[in-house]
Image (cartoon, helix red, strand yellow):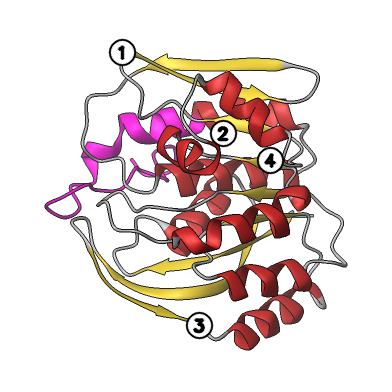
Amino acid sequence: MVAKALTIAGSDSGGGAGIQADLKAFSAMGVYGASVVTAVTAQNTQAVTAIHAIPDDVVAAQIEAVLSDIEIKAIKIGMLGTPSLIKTVSDALKGYDGPVVLDPVLVAKSGDTLLADSAIDVLKSELFERATLLTPNLPEAAKLVGSGKPQDQARALLDLGVGAVLMKGGHADGETCIDYLVSNTDTQSFSAPRVKTRNTHGTGCSYSSAIAACMAQGMALQDAVARAHTWLNAAILRADDLDVGRGHGPVHHFHALWG
């Protein structure tokens, strides 16, 4: 049987990030994807020009509709936006006991803010203990726990209750990009040569969704991260083939399927 995964996130009209990227990543991993839309954004490769939040009760109804009917094996959570919506999602997932990958979406690739500072404390208190894995990039980690070495930031996040932290190194300097998977018992690194491309829109969404998809298929966390890391690196290497937009284009989710 095909595994099923759920993404709870915002919609990207440009198709490169958010719900659209999540569903593409699920499909690329061989997983059926369901979705709960938390916000509709007017967005392309250059900017976010408008955000319309979906009412909290409609988000809750979407989650209930999916979980009451479809056997969801893993959940990815992305853009939430407001304190009340974070609480709504937390309450709606109280009966769910599968793995949850939480991608703390704070700022878009264009630099536009997607989560108000006032909501960060609520995100920590409501969802961190529910997260099997937290996947911040370096700027997001700094907003969450302050600046410092990636491993120290990861331990500070572990102290807030998350099960494990994947510190993504895409924003660091150097010719090699290194991600650190840190738990209370182990640290593992995943490295790849840095790809010279501006087409990296949706990398965080796609990475976390690919991990969730692998976990939906029953893979252990370290194996899921390893497979997703390899897939994402290839998706970035092939990103320029797509030629989408005039700004930060998307990665190539279907590099292994399209010619």
Q: Earlier in the sequence, mark 4 or mark 3?
A: 3
Task: Establish if 34 lies above or below 156.
Answer: below
Is 41 colored magenta in this rendering?
no
Task: Establish if 215 lies above or below 246.
Answer: above
Task: Establish if 144 lies above or below 158.
Answer: below
Q: Is residue 227 visible?
A: no
Q: Earlier in the sequence, mark 3 or mark 2?
A: 3
> Residue reaching furthest top?
175
Amino acid residing under circle 3:
Ile
Calculate the distance from the C-alpha at mark 2 to the C-alpha at mark 1.
22 Å
The 10 Å Cα crowd at callout 2, few under 14, some 14 to 19, many 20 or more, is many
Of residues 258 and 250, which is closer to you in this image? 250
> Residue reaching furthest left?
246
Contact between labelled residues 1 and 4, with CB atoms less than 8 Å apart: no
What residue is disc 1 on?
174
Amino acid residing under circle 4:
Leu
Calculate the distance from the C-alpha at mark 4 to the C-alpha at mark 2.
14 Å
Amino acid residing under circle 1:
Gly
Q: Assign a secondary structure to mark 1.
A: loop
Residue 213: % across, % down? 65, 47
The 10 Å Cα crowd at callout 3, few under 14, some 14 to 19, many 20 or more, is some
The circle on residue 133 is 4
Q: Assign a secondary structure to mark 2.
A: helix
Q: Which residues are drawn in magenta?
A: 231-259
What residue is disc 2 on?
228
